[in-house]
Image: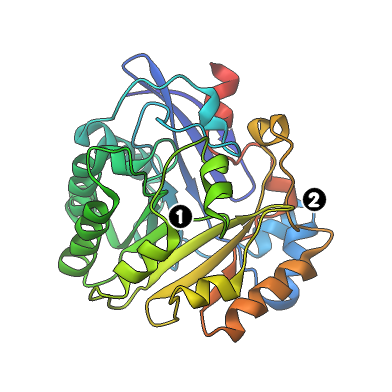
């Protein structure tokens, strides 16, 4: 795996690697303190000194992502990976090599209390389930090999596609098994939902057939879930239904689920399909109200908004598409 280029952000870097003739992305970022007064200052400022002042120390938390496929089998309307050709799955070794690359090129990070690593920069991990889960299991060994003292928090982010070698319920079972047995419950499983209307969900996922939310919620409620609940992700968009009461009627409860609300960030594909965010920097109070609706329903909810000055270039596939 050969280094090709890097894109610098105020809080981290996007790396472009050549994997047997195909360009893939992986990233390393520091988290930004986003609570209270700091949140307003951070999200609206164009001054890098303001961003740097509020970055969380590497030792406390570090955010990494790696790719699982060469491109992606799906054509989600909001994602720029959809504009790249799909050339198949990455091997377990190729996934692990991205982790090793990130650790080697950030040798100043010797230890971390929460090294959160997402397996969803480019690709849908459910189509490469065994390689991804085997790489996740190897994380402690990889960091030990590089003399790093890390407390890993793997993040498995999926749309739970039906047209897959493994059906969605098998994927849930496999990920939850690794979560509970290998990580004592400390694996972050995130289900990309984006709408509570199933027809809209399929459209946003480029026509993909995915596990419906009612079946998902009913199934998860029967599982043994410890320490970390299952997160339902909503990239909130204008004129796209996110109905808290509908989810509650399906059985969504705070003992099994959490919710993450994410403003739609600017992507080329999103603009082509005329997608607009429900709220972001100028009308952030709308996101707060939606969060409050979930909280009143008894479900822990966070808003995952990035700083305005970092929006360009951060989204999946953008750097690879430029070089493509």
Residue 219 % position (x, y): 30, 67
Residue 46, numbered label: 2
Residue 248 % position (x, y): 51, 77
- Give the class, few, some or many, for how many residues have Cα within 10 Å of label 1's Cα (few <14, many ≥20): some
Mark positioned earlier in the residue sequence (1 or 2): 2
For the residues labelled 1 and 2, the Cα–Cα distance comes to: 22 Å
**Left or right relative to 89: residue 40:** right
- Give the class, few, some or many, for how many residues have Cα within 10 Å of label 2's Cα (few <14, many ≥20): some
Give the quadrant of residue 240.
Answer: bottom right
Residue 312 in view: yes
Give the quadrant of residue 226.
Answer: bottom left
Query: Above or below — where is 232 with respect to 272?
Result: below
Mark 1 lies on a secondary structure that is: strand
Residue 200 % position (x, y): 58, 48
Residue at 76% across / 58% down in the picture? 279
Viewer-side residue, 204 vs 284: 204
Query: Above or below — where is 27 with respect to 232?
Result: above
User: Which residue is the site of mark 1?
Assistant: 63
What is the image's colouring?
rainbow
Residue at 45% across / 33% down in the picture? 74
**Left or right relative to 91: residue 294:** right
- Count of number-bearing discs: 2
**Left or right relative to 131: residue 199:** right
Query: Above or below — where is 172 with respect to 319?
Result: below
Residue 100 in view: no
Viewer-side residue, 232 vs 119: 232
Query: Above or below — where is 320 with respect to 177?
Result: above
Residue 103 % position (x, y): 34, 45
From the image, which quarter does the N terminus lie in? top left
Viewer-side residue, 277 vs 69: 277
């Amino acid at each position: 795996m050969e280094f090709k280029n890097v894109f610098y952000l105020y809080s981290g870097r996007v790396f472009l690697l050549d994997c047997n003739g195909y360009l893939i992305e992986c990233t390393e970022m520091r988290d930004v303190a986003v609570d209270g007064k700091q949140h307003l200052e951070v999200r609206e400022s164009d001054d890098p000194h303001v961003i740097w002042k509020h970055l969380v120390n590497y030792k406390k938390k570090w955010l990494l992502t790696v790719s699982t496929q060469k491109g992606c089998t799906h054509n989600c309307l909001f994602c720029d990976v959809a504009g790249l050709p799909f050339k198949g799955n990455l091997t377990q070794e190729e996934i692990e090599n991205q982790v090793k690359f990130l650790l080697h090129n950030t040798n100043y990070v010797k230890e971390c209390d929460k090294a959160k690593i997402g397996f969803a920069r480019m690709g849908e991990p459910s189509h490469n389930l065994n390689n991804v889960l085997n790489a996740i299991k190897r994380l402690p060994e990889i960091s030990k090999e590089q003399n790093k003292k890390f407390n890993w928090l793997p993040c498995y982010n999926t749309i739970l596609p039906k047209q897959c070698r493994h059906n969605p319920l098998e994927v849930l079972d496999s990920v939850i098994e690794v979560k509970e047995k290998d990580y004592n419950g400390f694996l972050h499983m995130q289900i990309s939902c984006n709408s509570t209307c199933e027809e809209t969900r399929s459209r946003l996922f480029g026509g993909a057939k995915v596990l419906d939310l009612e079946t998902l919620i009913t199934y998860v409620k029967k599982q043994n879930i410890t320490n970390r609940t299952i997160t339902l992700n909503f990239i909130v968009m204008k004129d796209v239904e996110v109905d808290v009461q509908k989810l509650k009627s399906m059985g969504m409860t705070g003992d099994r689920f959490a919710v993450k609300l994410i403003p739609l960030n600017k992507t080329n594909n999103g603009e082509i399909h005329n997608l607009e965010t429900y709220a972001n920097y100028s009308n952030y109070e709308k996101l707060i109200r939606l969060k409050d609706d979930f909280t009143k329903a008894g479900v822990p909810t966070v808003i995952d908004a990035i700083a305005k000055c970092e929006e360009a270039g951060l989204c999946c596939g953008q750097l690879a598409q430029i070089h493509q």
